[in-house]
Amino acid sequence: MGSLTKTVVLLCVISSVLCTPFINKLQPGQEWPTRSSVKQPYHQFDEIENGTISDTVATEVAAQEEKAPENNKPKVKEDDVERIDYSGAQVWKVSTKKSNAHRVINQLASEKLIASWGGNHTSIDILVKPKAVENVTATLKNKDIAYYIMIEDLQQRIDEENPPLDENELELQDRRGHRMTWKQYHRLEDIHGFLDYLAKTYPSIVSVNSIGKSHEGRDLKVLRISDGKKTNKAVFIDGGIHAREWISPAVVTYFINQFAENFDVESDDIRNIDWYFLPVVNPDGYEYTHKTDRLWRKNRRGFGGCAGADLNRNFGYQWGGKGASRYPCSEIYRGSGPFSEPESKAIAQFFKSTGADFSAYLTYHSYGQYLLYPWGYDNALPPDHKNLETVGKMMAQAIQKTGGSEYKVGSSSGLLYPAAGGSDDWAKSLNIKYTYTIELSDTGRYGFVLPASYIEPVARENLAGLRVLASQVNKE
Ligand SMILES: [Zn+2]
């Protein structure tokens, strides 16, 4: 062995990151690079704080929901599936400008009259249960807290959200070799079928691997698009961490379709990146929102009387801090420990074992129209926050120029509220430079129940944002 080779091998043993070009001798698109040795990004496991309950609205609502069983909602039988009926439930935007607003909202939540849908520093969106409309109206009027009704009847919106495809589309679907369209929200089977179709159709650039299984045994499929150039950068994109945010997997699969179907004519910025997409991080929850409860958020693992951990509170950096709950019935239950959930754990293991050296991690959520960078766990900023702000603003500009939607840019904790255990913080802790959580449309008119006719416009404008990111990654 020559001395140069010896040095290279030694370097490989010390640092697999440096070695990626040397170990990646595989045919383009066929096999994925894996690490020859593994760096340990989990030092923070030793630094877990005791799960302190913060005073943020979400957390208090969570704490109050400790004993609320998930099945206290009316259900109707439909095709042998118990579907939760939201008839008469409303969604309101409540101003939090008055100092007593948070206290009043927490009180209403503790009485199980409302549930939080999210908010920022000026307002909070709440779901008002059908029987509570009168009571909550009186309370807010009495306290002089401003609000307006965004959704009069939630079930009606749910019924109108995802209409069946027309005959032309159905015919196209049969001819295409996969069932995916961006005119409808599709079941997991269609999404996975689409990924497999691309791998079969474009084997030289597209490959699909299951990086693990969900609690109920569904595959966590990652699709890679790459021409195998050794100089390529790498970008990881996921969607569907939260089950009810249907626009997210729809947008991520739109990106996949664009890059895979048009790779030959795509820009160099796109072709010089190894793309990794995990469009549905939470497949059990996603299927559950289609079959049973349209507004389910968490995964579907059982914890005593309640199901589900919030996967976006389960990642292993600053796990258990502010804005995450220790109570299994809470919507923001953090899980029993960092990466206690099979879905988040699979992502962690994938990053540990992959030989790819990621320059960017993007995670798509809804709703609110925000481009958020770390940190989320507390009001703190990473050293390169100015750079993240600048690039975020460039992405937001491209989005607005393309489709007209206005996205606000800032740190998660600063623009919204602290939420520890998020995937973005964890990705940033791995030194992935461009880490963003993107909250897609809208700003509350439809909230989570965004009609399928919005998929294409939302995806198109966000593709423009993604192109800006790709260009930036190539400049690094
Ligand atoms: Zn989300």
Image (tube, rainbow, N blue to C red):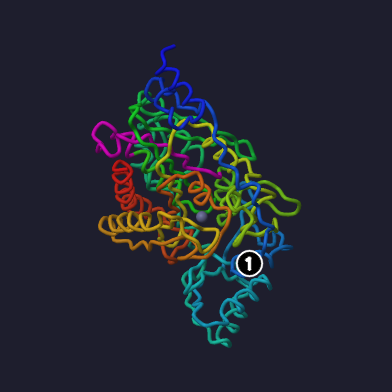
Q: Is residue 147 above or below residue 201?
A: below
**Amino acid found under the numbered disc labelled 1:** Ser
Which residue is rendered at x = 49% and y = 80% of the image? 97
Q: Is residue 265 magenta?
A: yes
| Residue 249 place in picture, x, y as percent | 45, 46
Tag count in the figure? 1
- Nearer to us in this view, 124 or 340: 340
| Residue 2 place in picture, x, y as percent | 41, 13
> Could you tell whether 390 is left or right of 309 in the image?
left
Q: Quadrant of the C terminus?
A: top left
Which residue is rendered at x = 31% and y = 53% of the image? 461
What residue range appears in magenta?
258-282
- Nearer to us in this view, 294 or 226: 226
- Nearer to us in this view, 241 or 189: 241
Q: Is residue 189 magenta?
A: no
Q: Residue furthest front?
A: 3
Residue 327 image-quadrant placement: bottom right
- Nearer to us in this view, 266 or 157: 266
Q: Residue furthest right?
A: 304
Q: Which residue is mark 1?
A: 54
Q: Secondary structure at mark 1?
A: loop
| Residue 296 place in picture, x, y as percent | 58, 54
Q: Is residue 441 above or below residue 362?
A: below
Q: Is residue 29 above or below residue 279?
A: above
